[in-house]
Image (cartoon, helix red, strand yellow):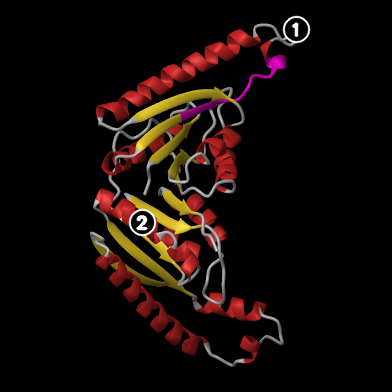
């Protein structure tokens, strides 16, 4: 599924923490890795307030430093037998990443989401957000921790939040690709509304809404919702097992979707959360973009995001 993995870097140790996740995926999938370093043009006023002299020398020096750094990173992929290339260029980080990703729809973009250190280093959260909203490519987002990049990661479980919609299920082919490549467990998550969430939803409906006139207690709703969610998880599990998933578990939870997913992700380390980013339809269906945003910020785990279509 992933022919190419595009890895944007800003020269900081924080941005390089994504590499430990990319390396095993690329190795197993035989994907080509492209390292991309985008250097923001130097403001002439910063080069020399009086005349803007030495601008070319500064730009050349920055490009040379970037290429040296990329060469060091490139060697790690080469030693693992992964086909890798690198490029250093000047421009807007987000625009350059989007333009490169758009060359091939079978490209997975993998990048860190925060970190700034020194001149011409990106505010990664802002860049990642712009990229996410500008491409149709899947995006692997890693929240870096202070310190150097980890030399090795071991993803053991892919946590997959589903809301029962076809939009949310668009992540499943991507989940299967990674699960088979890394031989890891798939944990299917379905979250039904808690009493508080249910009452909040009901109170938000217009007075003349057909549903609001239906006098259904929370207990009645919960019984039906749990039965439907359980049946749904059974169906998805059977489908994935038929497709050759290494291991699949089901988890039915109650509460706010983002909070429940974050709690699951924090139970153990070495998780990857995989989900779509848009779509909402009906009670119990999530505002997937909002849930994805909260999970990225709150779980601490890497998140594989797939833009839902349709």
Which of the two residues, 216 or 91, is positioned nearer the viewer here? 91
Bin the neighbour count of mark 1 within 10 Å (Cα to Cα): few under 14, some 14-19, many 20 and up: few
Residue at 48% from the left image edge and 55% from the top image edge = 295
Q: Which residue is mark 2?
A: 175
Name the image quarter holding the C terminus. bottom right
Residue 245: name its quadrant: bottom left
Left or right, 69 with respect to 179, comes to right
Residue 254: name its quadrant: bottom left
**Residue 81 magenta:** no
Bin the neighbour count of mark 2 within 10 Å (Cα to Cα): few under 14, some 14-19, many 20 and up: many
Q: Which mark is residue 84?
A: none
Measured as percent of width and height from the top left, residue 21 is found at 35, 41
Which range is magenta?
A: 36-46
Total marks shown come to 2
Above or below, comparing residue 73 to residue 113 in the picture: above
Q: Which residue is mark 1?
A: 51
Above or below, comparing residue 271 to residue 53 in the picture: below
């Amino acid at each position: 599924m992933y022919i190419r993995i595009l890895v944007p870097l800003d020269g900081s140790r924080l941005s390089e923490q994504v590499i430990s996740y990319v390396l095993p995926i690329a190795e197993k999938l035989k994907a080509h890795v492209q390292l991309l370093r985008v250097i923001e043009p130097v403001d002439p006023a910063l080069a020399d307030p009086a005349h803007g002299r030495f601008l070319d020398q500064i730009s050349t020096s920055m490009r040379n430093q970037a290429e040296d750094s990329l060469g060091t990173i490139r060697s790690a992929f080469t030693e693992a037998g992964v086909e890798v290339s690198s490029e250093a260029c000047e421009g807007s980080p987000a625009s350059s990443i989007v333009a490169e990703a758009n060359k091939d729809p079978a490209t997975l973009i993998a990048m860190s989401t925060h970190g700034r250190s020194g001149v011409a280093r990106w505010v990664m959260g802002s860049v990642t957000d712009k990229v996410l909203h500008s491409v149709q490519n899947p995006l692997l987002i890693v929240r870096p921790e202070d310190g150097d990049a980890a030399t090795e990661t071991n993803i053991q479980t892919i946590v997959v939040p589903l809301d029962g919609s076809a939009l949310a299920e668009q992540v499943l082919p991507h989940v299967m690709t990674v699960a088979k490549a890394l031989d890891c467990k798939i944990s299917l998550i379905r979250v039904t509304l808690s009493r508080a969430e249910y009452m909040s939803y009901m109170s938000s409906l217009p007075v003349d809404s057909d549903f609001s006139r239906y006098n259904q207690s929370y207990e009645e709703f919960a019984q039906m919702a749990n039965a439907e969610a359980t049946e749904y998880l059974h169906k998805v599990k059977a489908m994935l097992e038929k497709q050759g998933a290494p291991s699949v578990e089901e988890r039915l939870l109650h509460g706010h979707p983002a909070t429940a997913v974050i709690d699951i992700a924090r139970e153990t380390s070495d998780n990857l959360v995989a989900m779509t980013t848009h779509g909402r339809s009906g009670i119990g269906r999530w505002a997937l973009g909002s849930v994805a945003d909260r999970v990225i910020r709150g779980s601490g785990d890497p998140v594989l995001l797939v833009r839902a279509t349709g």
